[in-house]
Amino acid sequence: MSVAIIFDIERSAMHDGPGIRTVVFFKGCPLRCRWCHNPESWAFAPQEMYYPEKCIGCGRCAEGCYTGARQLCGQDMTVEQVMAPILADKPYYGAEGGVTLSGGEPQCQPEFLNALVDACRAEGIHTAIETSMAVYHPEILQKLDLIMADVKIWDDRLHQQYVGASNRPIQEHIRRADGLGVPLLIRTPVIPGVNDTEAEITAIRDFARSLKNVVGYELLPYHPFGEDKWQALGREPVRFSVPTTEQMQALRACAVLNK
Ligand code: SF4
């Protein structure tokens, strides 16, 4: 029986791939992006999150916090348990929707990921993955209908500084994944002061243009929604500014794949 540690299953999601989707969030990530809006995904084990503003001081923590001030993030789940909400949502997927495997990094739990993909495919459900490509399991990726791969920063010195690892293996994994024949969507989170330059975006765009199975290049503006989660984990969030509409328009003009 294959088991993985999962920290959330979001239903009726509209922004994690085409159509209406069920998003399965795998816990555990080898990277440490300083802007990460899912820092609770980093550790490969359940962990407590504490939201002091929800605490009423009742002292009943040991009985289970009913205000949500103390929450346990992450639990072991079987493929059957994860498939239950997916099968319940299946009537709503329509022609485009399906399941998105996200995280954290789903490829860090390959045995379970493989079994879950097989279970979705047996039901005729569209499968997509949101991946950093820091790890690479082609035997699983080749079964998917869509790979959404991040290229976060082109400059390797900046990548190591802000992501905590070199981008060279990631680029190599993406090049190899391009040979699998699965549609590839390249995405970049735009982080002001880090990668919000025309030089960065055009370098990534040129990389995307060099791949044969790329179906798009998307820029995702930074948002600070994860700050409370950093604090709930006892960490001080790293703060960035939000890119302006004009900035995003200018960078998106650089990100066009076909001219
Ligand atoms: S790869 Fe994703 S989940 Fe991992 S640290 Fe970066 S933003 Fe967070």
Image (tube, grey):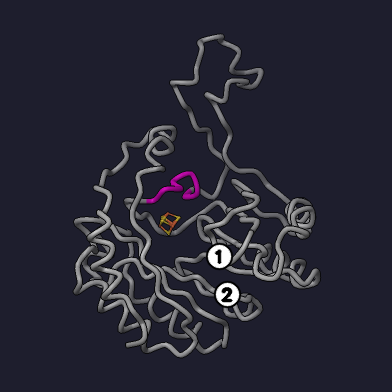
What's the residue type where badge 2 is placed? Answer: Leu
Whole-percent x, y for residue 51 in the image: 46, 26
Q: Quadrant of the N terminus?
A: bottom right
Is residue 5 shown left or right of residue 210?
Answer: right
Question: Residue 223 got which mark?
Answer: none
Q: Are marks 2 and 1 in contact (CB under 8 Å)?
A: yes
Q: Name the element at disc 1.
A: loop
Identify the residue shown where x is 23% and y is 72%: 200
Q: Which residue is mark 1?
A: 17
Q: Quadrant of the C terminus?
A: bottom left
Q: Is residue 77 above or below residue 137?
A: above
Is residue 74 shown left or right of residue 53?
Answer: right
Highlighted range, magenta: 36-42
What's the residue type where badge 1 is placed? Answer: Gly
Identify the residue shown where x is 34% and y is 66%: 152
Identify the residue shown where x is 52% and y is 89%: 179
Whole-percent x, y for residue 154 in the image: 27, 72
Q: Earlier in the sequence, mark 2 or mark 1?
A: 1
Q: Residues within 10 Å of mark 2 (few under 14, many from 20)?
A: many
Magenta stretch holds residue 40 = yes
Is residue 176 shown left or right of residue 253?
Answer: right
Q: Is residue 123 above or below residue 92?
A: below
Whole-percent x, y for residue 245 in the image: 27, 56
Mark 2 or mark 1, which is nearer to you? 1
Question: Residue 146 got which mark?
Answer: 2
